[in-house]
Image (tube, rainbow, N blue to C red):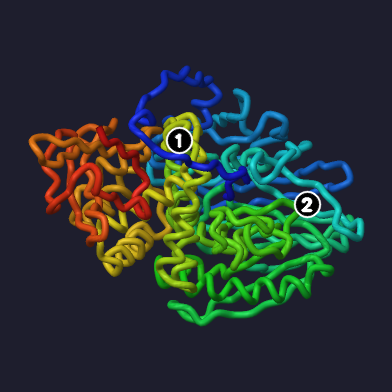
Amino acid sequence: MIKKLLLPVILLGIIGSTHAQLIEPKEKFTHADTLRGSLTPLRTCYDINYYHLDVKVNIDQKFISGSNLFKFTATQDFTKLQFDLFANLNVDKVVYKGKTLPVTREGNAVFVTFPQTITNGSRDEFKVYYSGNPTIAKNAPWDGGLVFQKDSLGKPWVATACEGVGASIWWPNKDHLSDEVDSMMISISVPKGLKDVSNGRLRKVTALKDGYTRFDWFVANPINNYDVAANIGDYTHFSDSYDGEKGKLTLDYWVLPASLTKAKKQFGENVKPMLKAFEHWFGPYPFYQDGYKLVETPHLGMEHQSATAYGNHYLNGYLGYDMSGTGWGLKWDYIIVHESGHEWFGNNITGKDLADMWIHESFTCYSESLFIEDNWGKKAGQEYNKGLRAGISNDSPIVGVYNVNKEGSGDMYPKGAVLLNMVRTIINDDEKWRTILRGLNSTFYHQTVTYDQVVNYINEQSGKNLLPIFDQYLHYKTLPTLEFAMKDGKLLSRWIADAHGFTMPVQVRVKGGEYKFITPTTHFTPVDVDSATKDNIEVDTFNYYIGILKD
């Protein structure tokens, strides 16, 4: 997803006072939050294998109706399970082996009781029929729901966007990030004359007797729920291909007819350079079977797997704005690059809990600077990365609250990207860093992951103790402060930080000299740089986002 556009904040300086931690009121969570965000036995008792979502969209009435087939494997013996569907949508019936099952609801959580025990290891299925007027998104993609608009010719233009709030805002599913369905059929029926574009590959188009047309799209790879998308409009299609690391990748573009000329130019200039850069840094595009698509949408954009939503009006930058303030952000289309970066981080590697949304957004925001580096050089990429600091608020921790579907601070975008550049600087071996990024995508290929899995992998592969660094920048809102002091004519330094046992190598130099790594702890130790004093010591603030205090 993309962050909301905020005017840059000019950082006048970061001193020791930034370290003061304010006491903030703790957010209160409800039973509904727990039902949505936690893995109870009623959710862990079954593993989703396959969905067939079959939905008719009545655009005039803003009404949807249809069904979703759940095919699953039991992970234990059970007679009752939970799936999810927002309370404003009606569960018409749940059918199992030809019979209607009893259903109860607690808000957006739906509970189904089976007539006999479903035994551990067995494969089974049930179908949910549902209908209603779905939530209308007021400000997609930042709030969830359906977007009902018209294109420039007055024809209907409809899209879904539901990251964060969850896919159950428009279709029934096991709405928890930890369980991605292995494969899926998405069947969307729309009024005659319109097309639906969803994830994966188009299998079939069927003219229905009621004046609707059904589009069947098959997703061959695991997909997280919020990525599942319907995009309805008077689309036109053009295509291309890319010779990538795993062979020929199909490129399919679905845009409004009035946008065709602009789209061919903008997509042609951005997509292949993006794929080249990201396959270099992250490994092969993770969804060759399902192809790569860009779909023009009435909202700004979203990382819908193999069907990236695009609404940047064919402008470079973020709606023509440079997020970094450096000029580098105006040389490429932000939505194409950022949302496509999520194919690796967010779609290939998916956090198990929304609290770890930083795994999606920090790496993807960082990918922007790697795209720049691949096209205009390392210094350009790092300049862009440093410029992103203007958007950091340091308002709350980047890691959210677990088990209640609560992500952390929006700093997960720029501050997370800056953190990853610091980690790269500390590793001080660009090829090793590239190997780590590619290794993440191969080791956790098509998997859901935890904070510990990602951080421990980077820590182990780097051969450096990075755990307290990730802890400080992700679990605390304040920056670590590097304090210098003179004692008996000798320069000393220490870190002031929240993370237990914090230590971080940092590059310093005497003015005019070469940078050298020192590794301060939370206790004053001598600075091993010849002739260094408080007055002439310089810290690499180009690559390090820290506080500096000189007593």
On the image, which quarter does residue 450 sit in?
Answer: top left
**Between discs 2 and 1, the one toward the N terminus:** 2
User: Disc 2 residue type?
Assistant: Val
Tell me what residue is drawn at x 70 percent, y 41 percent: 145
Nearer to us: label 2 or label 1: 1
Q: Which mark is residue 158?
A: 2
On the image, which quarter does residue 201 sit in?
Answer: bottom right
Residue at mark 2 to residue at mark 1: CA–CA distance: 36 Å
* Residue 248 visible in this rendered orientation of the protein: yes
Tell me what residue is drawn at x 77 percent, y 43 percent: 64
The reply, left or right, for residue 464 in relation to residue 267 is left
Secondary structure beneath dot 1 equals: loop
The residue tagged 1 is 394
User: Disc 1 residue type?
Assistant: Asn
The percent position of residue 113, horizontal first and vertical second, equals 54, 30
Where does the C terminus fall, quadrant-wise? top left
The reply, left or right, for residue 491 in relation to residue 437 is left
Few, some or many C-alpha atoms within 10 Å of disc 1 (few <14, some 14-19, many ≥20)? some
Secondary structure beneath dot 2 equals: strand
The percent position of residue 26, horizontal first and vertical second, equals 46, 19
